[in-house]
Image (cartoon, rainbow, N blue to C red):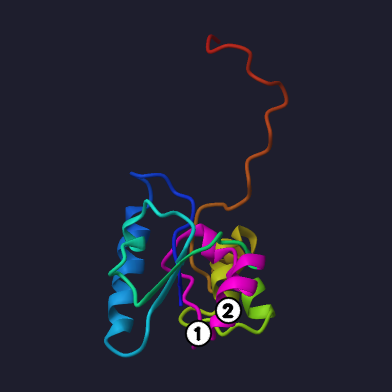
Amino acid sequence: MILGSGPNRIGQGIEFDYCCCHASFALQDRIESIMVNCNPERSLTDYDTSDRLYFEPLTLEEVLTSSIPRKPDGVIVQFGGQTPLTLALPLKAAGVPIIGTDPENIDLAEDRKRFGKLLDDLKIPSPETAPRPAPKKPATSLEP
């Protein structure tokens, strides 16, 4: 099962559609491919992209109650962008097999502090990863 890109608008996230479609095509050569996405306007929701296609909200609750009971061999989250990436750890915690990148590694790459610490531990130079502090005084105009 592949989790699609979620609620992107037309013109956004074409790289996610491309990756999800090609993952589905590759799966179709070997096993039944299932695509889950909430947006019917995406190319990854064309009727011939997957063997089975479900229009479901990409939330943890919906994926667990609507999609997982269909008994997929596993779930691929890393091609759909931020929406499915945020579901990786909770899905794994619920016992859903994740195919591909381990959710702990996805979280490591997404968490700036953890990723910065990893780079420091490996002695890999990188820009400072700390968030910028909020301005003390809000801007009231564009003029100095």
136, 95: nearer the viewer: 95
Q: Position of residue 48 (x, y in %)?
A: 28, 69
Question: Is residue 112 rendered magenta in the image?
Answer: no
Q: Residue furthest right?
A: 136
- For label 2, the crowd category at 10 Å Cα-Cα, with few meaning under 14, some 14 to 19 and many 20 or more, is some
Q: Residue at x 55, y 10 (%)?
A: 144
13, 131: nearer the viewer: 13
5, 48: nearer the viewer: 48
Q: Label 1 belongs to which residue?
A: 72
Q: Is residue 137 left or right of residue 35?
A: right
Q: Residue at x 53, y 59 (%)?
A: 83
* Snapshot quadrant of residue 2: bottom left
Q: Label 2 belongs to which residue?
A: 68
* Snapshot quadrant of residue 49: bottom left
Q: Are marks 1 and 2 in contact (CB under 8 Å)?
A: yes
* Snapshot quadrant of residue 23: bottom left
- For label 1, the crowd category at 10 Å Cα-Cα, with few meaning under 14, some 14 to 19 and many 20 or more, is some
Q: Which residues are magenta?
A: 61-88
Amino acid type of the residue tagged 1 in the rendering? Pro
